Structures are given as structure tokens and as C-alpha cells.
Amino acid sequence: MIRATRMLIACALLLGSATAVVAQGHVKPITPPDARGRAVLAQANLAKGMKVLVSTENRWLWLVRGRDTLMSVPVAVGMGKSFTFEGKSFHFDTPRGRRTVIGKSESPIWNVPEWHYLERAAQHKYKVERIDTKKKYLLKDGTFILTIGKNVGRLNLAGHFWPFTPGLEIMYDSTVFVPPVGTEQRLVPDALGPFKLDTGDGYLFHGTHIYNEDEIGEAVSHGCVRLRNDDLGRFYATVPVGTPVYIF
């Protein structure tokens, strides 16, 4: 039954009709939501060889080679929402169209974008302070935040310096402190899972942190396509650089 369903999925993709996926024992029809999506799917159906297809409407990914469907798995996609803070606006969506896998890496480190800190400030109703490597920032308790070398840390009253743990926001006195680009505190391990595949412009296929494993199948990301870590391992091992990606 599983094999027959996979064959149905592959044939539907290749024929350009509505596809189908198995979700908890039932077949769910897939149709791109608009003309743009249908055009991208039609382009994908004409492509030969290996290709990746992603439905943003149904939050599903297929890896297809020829007439074979190698993978059919749920994913998390962009939330489709906008965010504005301090006059800066961002739109978090997974861009539809044709892309290409331009790079792959293991144990990726997340270089945190500015919007992450702005979101935290908005959530807590804090202000934002972008750390200047040449300055010290006095806190209400008499300690300082400052940068030494490639580390942002806290200097206590006894003159001892402790770097902040990468991956933890620096928040004191109703302020979110943004670490400078290039410092260790701007780099977060484990956030992207064990692997990433880069499609350019900051849009990745990557894994899932333990704290948001239940978000797979939802529109919750800031634009990247997020897979379960087990699925990502198979995907990473199978997909070579240069593989076309069709997002509809």
C-alpha cells in the first residue's frame, strides 16, 4: 500500500495534476493555491533528473528522481507574516519559484540576523542596544557589558570578565543587547540541526531544534524550509549541490 501510494505521488507530479500525500492514513489532495504556484509546478514537471519540490500550502516536500519519489515528508515553511520594529520591516515567507542547492554543510552554525533580536525586544517590550566593540555599557548593578576580542561578556565589580554563552540573548535593564557581527555571541550552535543545504539569499533547508520539533508541518519559520532531523539526514545524503528546487 505504501509503495502504491508513493507511485501515485510520483505519477501525479510528473503529469502536472494535483498530487497526493499520505497524512495519518488518508490521502490528501495537493493543488497549488494560485496561478503562480501552478506555473512553478508545471516548470518542475518538465525538469529532468533529480529535483526537490516543496508545497508551501500543504507544507510538504518531495525529492524526485526521474519517475521515482525518493522522499515524501512534512516540513515547516515560512509563516507568511510581516514584522515591524523601530521603523524596520521584515516579511517572513518562503519564496516561491525555482531555486538551486548552491552549498551543503554539516554541523552548521546560525549567524543570527538582526530581526531575531528585534523580535525579542518586541516580545518583552524592551529597547534595543546594538553593541559597539569600542564601548562599555554600564548596567544598573554596577557591572559592564563589553567586547574583548571576539567575545561579548560581563565585567563584574571585581574586574573579572565572563563571556556570555552563545545562543542566549543578552537582556538586562529592559534592554536587548545585540552582539556585533563576528563575535562568538552572534553565532548559535544547534539551532539549524545537524545539516543545512543553502539555496541562496539566506534561505536554507535545515533541521529542527529540540524545542520546536512539534512545528514540522506548520507555517512557522522565518522563510527557511525546516525538516525533521532524521529526514534531513537522508535528504542531505541524497541531494547533491546543483539540484534544482521548485517551491510552489
Image: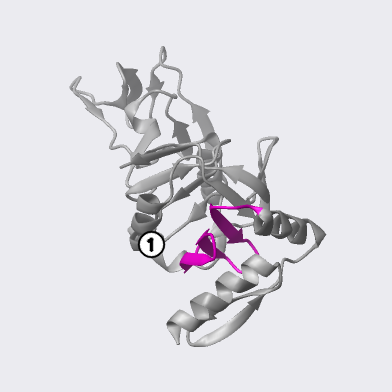
- Measuring from the top left, give residue 67's x and y in whole percent: 54, 65
What span is in magenta?
47-75
**Label 1 residue SS:** helix
Farthest-out residue, top: 134
- Measuring from the top left, give residue 126's x and y in whole percent: 53, 42
Q: Is residue 228 left or right of residue 224?
A: left
In the displayed structure, 19 sits above or below 1; it is above
Q: Is residue 229 left or right of residue 99?
A: left
> Is 55 a magenta residue?
yes
- Measuring from the top left, give residue 213's x and y in whole percent: 39, 64
In the displayed structure, 50 sits above or below 10; it is above
Q: Residue at x 46, y 31 (%)?
A: 178
Give whichever of 243, 65 is nearer the camera: 65
Amino acid type shown at disc 1: Asp
Confirm whether residue 140 shows in the render. no
> Is 60 a magenta residue?
yes
Residue 106 sits in quarter: top left
Residue 247 sits in quarter: bottom right
Confirm whether residue 199 shows in the render. yes
Give whichever of 58, 150 is nearer the camera: 58
What residue is disc 1 on? 231
Main secondary structure along the magenta-highlighted residues: strand
- Measuring from the top left, give residue 46's x and y in whole percent: 68, 55
Name the quarter where the C terminus is drawn.
bottom right
Callout 1 crowding tier (Cα within 10 Å): few <14, some 14–19, many ≥20: some
Q: Residue at x 65, y 47 (%)?
A: 98
Give whichever of 162, 10 is nearer the camera: 10
